[in-house]
Image (tube, helix red, strand yellow):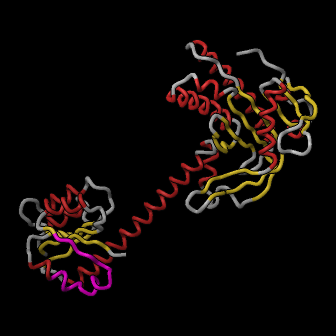
Amino acid sequence: MTAKILVVDDEVDLQELMKRKFRREIRHGEFSFEFAGDGVEALEKIQNDPSIDLVVSDINMPRMDGLTLLENLEDFENNLRTIIISAYGDMENIRTAMNRGAFDFVTKPIDFHDLLITMKKTLDQLDVFKEAVEHRMAAERARGNLARYFSPKVVETLAGRDEPFGTPRQQDVGVLFTDIRDFTTISETLSPAEVMEMLRSFHGRMEEAVFEHNGTLEKFIGDAILATFGTPDTGPQDATNALTCARAMLAALDAWNADRTAAGDRPIGIGIGVHYGPVVLGDIGSERSMEFAVLGDTVNSASRLEGLTRSIDTDLVVSRALVDRVREEAGDGAPAVLEGLEEAGEQEVKGRSGKIPVFALRRRAAA
């Protein structure tokens, strides 16, 4: 890649001399040169051309000298380097230049072989710096991507891995699906801004419940939310966490509806379906756009269980598979999280050949 070098000096002859001395590097595409007669012109060029990598500047110039130029360069991002040219005996100015951020210096009369070595050394250091910045930015992007799905605690753990999600695989997880009842009808009575504000409030409260119970926020789908428990790593309480999260969502909904009613807004209802079973998980998409995803019958069934909340007239439907797993996780005794759940028989669900035995939460009093 060609390094762009800005030479700042009021001696016009230096321009042709630099081109001649470094014609080999110019011909091979290593260097390209820009020139400025003083610090003022140099600043204008740097402001208009962020691709400049290196500034080679004399100290004594009209209008703005090299030391003042160095002071002004502090206002720019640290993505370029400066080499100062000064007389051999001008050590005081050289020390001032180094204290103001110059990377290195060469003395007059210029030894162009020494200048070439100094420029290459400076550009090598700049490449190392740019690479470090790129690594940091990539890490920040990766951390931001993880934060879309996981709680801050889990993000810290996953950020240290080379492959945060691991290789594509199948494992048993808890899957929770929820959405707002009659969302279309409700949204028809609201302005677009009010619809978006309601969704943000709903998503924010439900997301908090997911993260508090070690869940993964797989995605928002309009007014619906898909969350998983046991991804990317399984744990000893995945089914219990999924069901506990569902109850926390209902409690958060009650509190939010109390606020909505007090403000004169219409309370809303939600349905929640929770299932437990095998899923395929990993990154999907193209190289340009990848995202973490869980796939399979367990995910589809959780969505269908949420749909059953309307026909069974309840807020929460869970599969027997999940209930059985919760009991396994609890060991001896009856888990408190199962209180209020009653058998609702085997239910047909759309897109599935067999019926699913389910439990339903006793109908709660209206919030």
In which quadrant will I find the C terminus? Answer: top right
Q: Residue at x 9, y 79 (%)?
A: 13
Q: Position of residue 284 (x, y in %)?
A: 66, 57
**In magenta segment, residue 273:** no
Q: Residue at x 29, y 81 (%)?
A: 117
Q: Is residue 34 magenta?
A: yes
Q: Position of residue 148 (x, y in %)?
A: 59, 45
Horizontal arrangement in the rendering, residue 342 relative to residue 97 (left or right): right
Quarter of the rendering containing residue 70: bottom left
The answer to whether any part of residue 104 appears in the image is yes
Q: Range of the magenta residues?
A: 17-35
Farthest residue, direction left: 62
The x, y position of residue 350, in whole percent, is: 83, 40
Instruction: Tell me if I can see residue 330 in this picture.
Output: no
Q: Please, which residue is most extreme toward the bottom here?
A: 24
In the image, is 352 to the left or to the right of 235?
A: right
Task: Tell me what residue is drawn at x 28 percent, y 85 percent.
Answer: 27
Left or right, 230 with respect to 128, comes to: right
Residue at 23% from the left image edge and 58% from the top image edge:
47
Image quadrant occupied by the N terminus:
bottom left
Name the foreground residue: 129 vs 142.
Answer: 142
Residue 176 point in image, percent of width and height: 75, 38
